[in-house]
Image (cartoon, rainbow, N blue to C red):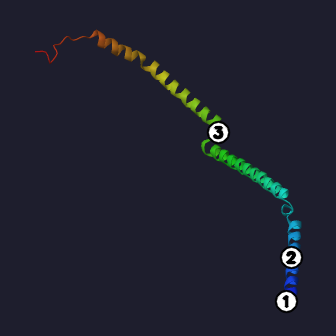
Amino acid sequence: MTSQSQGIQQLLQAEKRAKDKLEEAKKINPCFSSPLGKGKRLKQAKEEAIAEIDHYRLQREKEFRNKQTNVMGSQGDLSAKIEEQTKETIQKLTSSYHKNKESMMKKLLNMIYDINPEVHPNFR
C-alpha cells in the first residue's frame, strides 16, 4: 500500500511541476496561453517577414541603380551622347556631300557624254 501511495505522490508532484512549467511558459511567451494568441503571433510574424522582404528589396534596387549609374551613366547622359554623335555624323556627311558634289556631277556627265561605240566581245 505504501508503494502505491508513494507512486500517487510522485504522480501528483510531477503533475504540479508540469503545471508550473506550463505557467512559466505562458508568462514568457503569450502565444502559449491560447490558440488565438498563437494565430496572432503567426500573423505578426508574417507581417514582419513581409516588411523585412520589402526593405531588403528596396535596398537591393537602390544598390543596383547606383551601380548602373556608375557603370553606364544615367539615361539622360546616354541620350545626350547619342544625340551629339548623331549631329556630328550628319554634319560630316553634309560637308562631304557639298565638297564632292561638283566633281561627282562632272564625272557622271562625262560618262554620259563620252560614248565609245564598240562591238561587244561576245558578238560573233
> Is the residue 64 above or below the residue 110 in the image?
below
Q: Position of residue 3 (x, y in %)?
A: 85, 89
- Mark 3 surroundings within 10 Å by alpha-carbon count, few (fewer than 14), some (14 through 19), many (20 or more): few
Instruction: Give the residue at mark 1.
Output: 3
Q: Name the side, left or right, on which 115 lies relative to 33.
A: left
Write the residue at 65% across / 47% down.
64
> Is the residue 108 above or below the residue 26 in the image?
above
Q: Nearer the viewer, residue 65 or 28?
A: 28
Write the residue at 34% across / 14% down.
108
Query: For the residue labelled by badge 2, is the local secondary structure a helix, a strand or a loop?
Result: helix
> Mark 3 or mark 1: which is in front?
1
> Is the residue 55 above or below the residue 24 in the image?
above
Name which of mark 3 and mark 1 comes first in the sequence: 1
- Alpha carbons under labels 3 and 1: distance apart: 87 Å
Instruction: Give the residue at mark 3.
Output: 74
Write the residue at 89% across / 76% down.
16
Q: Nearer the viewer, residue 18 or 118?
A: 18
